Image (spheres, rainbow, N blue to C red):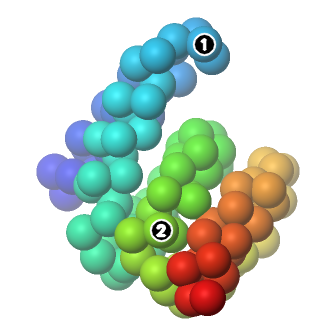
Amino acid sequence: MKELDMIKKIIEKRTSLHPDDPRIVECWGELTEIFSRNEQFVMDVLEQCSEEEIFWLSEIFEDISLYLQSSSFIRFLRSIQKKYPNIDIELDIQYAEKVLEDKSC
């Protein structure tokens, strides 16, 4: 999968950046653009990601949720959370839920 390789390269770039590096926003934007295509694509890719990759991708769960507007995406994130209990992505999932709730009002 060509997109998966591209996603992994962007994650690799993101992990190499200092936490205050403004290029982080560029990485987030690139990833969000890729992931905002369709929900099934997002879930297929996340299923193939490692625990560490999920950790880094959790930074954009809120942005993906904003585009997808899907409660099934939130349920999927919960299943990923159970799959990888050693990483703390609860807050990121809550932000993704909040965006969904705010949009439905």
Seen in the picture, residue 92 relative to 19 is either above or below; the reply is: below
Q: Is residue 16 left or right of residue 99?
A: left
Q: Which residue is mark 2?
A: 66
Q: Which residue is mark 1?
A: 20
Where disc 1 sits, the SS reads loop
Q: Is residue 103 left or right of residue 27?
A: right
Q: Is residue 94 left or right of residue 66?
A: right
Dot 1 amino acid type: Asp
C-beta proximity under 8 Å, tags 2 and 1: no
Quarter of the figure with residue 62: bottom right
In this orientation, does residue 105 appear?
A: yes
Dot 2 amino acid type: Leu
Which numbered disc flags the more N-terminal residue, 2 or 1?
A: 1
Q: Residues within 10 Å of mark 2 (few under 14, many from 20)?
A: many
For image coordinates 28% across by 53% down, the residue present is 33
For image coordinates 57% across by 88% down, the residue present is 104
Query: Which percent across, then down, holds residue 96?
Result: 63, 67
Alpha-carbon span between mark 2 and mark 1? 24 Å
In the displayed orientation, state which residue is furthest to the left.
Answer: 2
Q: Residues within 10 Å of mark 1 (few under 14, many from 20)?
A: few
Quarter of the figure with residue 30: top left
Work out which quarter of the rendered image holds the C terminus and state it: bottom right
In this orientation, does residue 77 appear?
A: no
Where disc 2 sits, the SS reads helix
Seen in the picture, residue 75 relative to 78 is either above or below; the reply is: below
For image coordinates 39% across by 70% down, the residue present is 67
